[in-house]
Image (cartoon, coloured by chain):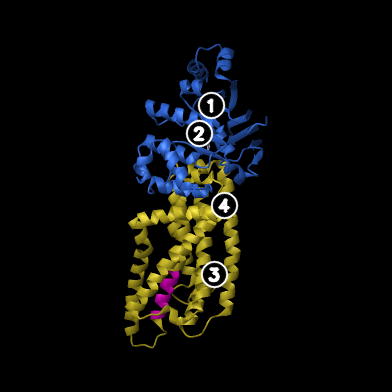
Amino acid sequence: MDPVLKVTNLTKVFNGLRAVDGISFEVARGEIVGVLGPNGAGKTTTIAMILGLLTPTAGTIQVLGMSMPQERQRILARVNFSSPYVAMPYNLTVLENLLVFAHLYGVQAPGKKIRELLEIFGLSTHSHQLTGRLSSGEATRLGLVKALLNDPEILFLDEPTASLDPDAAEHVRQTLLRIQQERGMTLVYTSHNMQEVERLSHRIIFLHRGRIIAEGSPAEVLRRFQQESLEQLFLEVARKQ
Amino acid sequence: MSAKRIAGLLLRHLYLYRRSLTRMLEVAYWPVMDLLVWGFVSLYIAQVPAKLPPVIGFFLGAMIFWDIFYRAQQAIAISFLEDVWARNLINLFITPLSVGEFLTATMILGILKVTVTSLLLVVLALSLYHFNLFHLGLSLIPLVANLILTGWWVGILTTGLILRFGQGAESLAWALAFLFQPFSAVFYPLSVLPPLVQVVGWYLPTTHVFEGMRQIIAGGGLSWAHLAWATGLNVIYLFAAMGIFQWAMAVARRLGLLLRVEG
Ligand SMILES: Nc1ncnc2c1ncn2[C@@H]1O[C@H](COP(=O)(O)OP(=O)(O)OP(=O)(O)O)[C@@H](O)[C@H]1O
Ligand SMILES: [Mg+2]
């Protein structure tokens, strides 16, 4: 089967710093891929290039068989992204913000879609609240609602559970997993929670200083590096810096 | 171009205005203050016995026209800043929204704001100072259209510079337009300026609009030459400003500014 995402020799240099250094990987439809690595490894930079927010210094990006950035608009209509570090206008209500993004994504029957998703993420009672007044966990979930408005074929998440308490994080993981299974959605996400990555990912991509140092199912990677857990592997790698 | 996406972005700003009293007031507050000051200044000058040209008309007309230009450019620059402040740029730029749609939406927003402001000013000027802008006839309309065009490209230029140079350039949203004021012969005829500065003025569309306006108020009718100059310059500058915005966008994508302007 054709990959939904194919990245070849992707490179980003900032002022001589090789933030992403010639990485290549593919993601198949319906896969859950966890991208991990220490702070500054190049995770966010990689995702930003795939989303067309950042122009690569070298390399090519194919999303759903189309090239980024040449077919930017057609790609962006079919994928989405969320991160707790990106906010939505604080001075609009939850519902207003979602209506705006529903327009931007050309969602059919936006009212129904929004109601469904708010329900799923436990935000129904907040729809008339100002976005700036949400707790950080609620804002994160609102970001996820926005990211699912257009039924993305590939969903990119940058540290989706970073601001959530353990219970909320678990709820979000379960919800994402359910939606992912129901819709055959592809999920590419970053996380610093190694247990989460181990449990959730079909495959992990371990980045270190802009390069892929390990790739495969969590079990495969652990076997290859002879480690008990990703946590240990992570510490091992991080300390070798 | 998708009308739905343009409407979506407009909606974002209309929601904002509906909710925010300060933003609503801004559409009215500054223009009305300006109008009051210039209105009374004009009344005072009119009392001076010397035979002067129709000064009330000149000052109030200039003031209203300046505001139309200023508000149009601000609508664009500030609507972009709202998204910078809200850390919303990433969300916007990962939607299928194109740069053209983005700019179109802000230009429409500019027209909406300008319409509200100028209606308010025209009504106030009429009721307070018996100055009827519409009396001057339909010939003012092409001049106003040109002011909005200038407001658009100055706004787009400002936005491009803010995108490229970040927070440090934010104040341009308020300042850049005023760079035009001394050279555009807003409150005095172009002939007052030193010859060299007149040349600069000649290449600003605003100069031709303000000269044209005074000519109409003085009863000279619409100057087709000024109108042609203003329109021609505006079209050229509008394309140039869009080019600069595209360039700023490309640089932003190269340097990762879209990820960091929000900081
Ligand atoms: N716009 C930029 N300009 C200059 N350097 C940048 C820019 N964006 C990222 N970098 C640098 O590139 C490297 C990779 O950053 P990136 O944000 O991709 O890391 P990350 O893996 O997401 O880290 P974290 O886990 O901390 O989020 C870092 O050294 C960072 O300082
Ligand atoms: Mg990151």
Check disc 2 and report the residue beneath it.
A157
Query: Mark 2 and mark 3 in contact (Cβ < 8 Å)?
Result: no
* In the image, residue B69 lies in the stretch drawn in magenta: no
Query: Mark 4 and mark 2 in contact (Cβ < 8 Å)?
Result: no
What chain letter is assigned to the residue under label 3? Answer: B
- As measured in the structure, the alpha-carbon distance from the residue carrying label 3 to the one carrying label 4 is 25 Å
Check disc 3 and report the residue beneath it.
B205
Q: Indicate left or right for A100 with A153 as reference.
A: left
Q: Indicate left or right for A16 with B90 as reference.
A: right
The quarter in which the C terminus of chain B is drawn is top left
How packed mark 4 is, by other alpha carbons closer than 10 Å (few <14, some 14-19, many 20 or more), is some
Query: Mark 4 and mark 3 in contact (Cβ < 8 Å)?
Result: no
Can residue B52 be seen by looking at this rendering? yes
Magenta-highlighted residues:
B56-66
Q: Quadrant of residue B236?
A: bottom right
Q: Amino acid at mark 4?
A: Val
The correct choice, above or below, for A151 with respect to B8 in the image is above
**Residue A177: x %, y % from top left:** 49, 28
The correct choice, above or below, for A71 with respect to A46 in the image is below
Magenta stretch, overall SS: helix
Task: In this rendered view, identify the residue nearer to me: B244 or B45.
Answer: B244
Between marks 1 and 4 in the image, the one whose residue lies nearer the viewer:
1
Chain identifier matching the blue colour in the rendered picture: A
Q: Secondary structure at mark 4?
A: helix
Q: Are marks 3 and 2 on the same chain?
A: no
What chain letter is assigned to the residue under label 4? Answer: B
Check disc 1 and report the residue beneath it.
A34
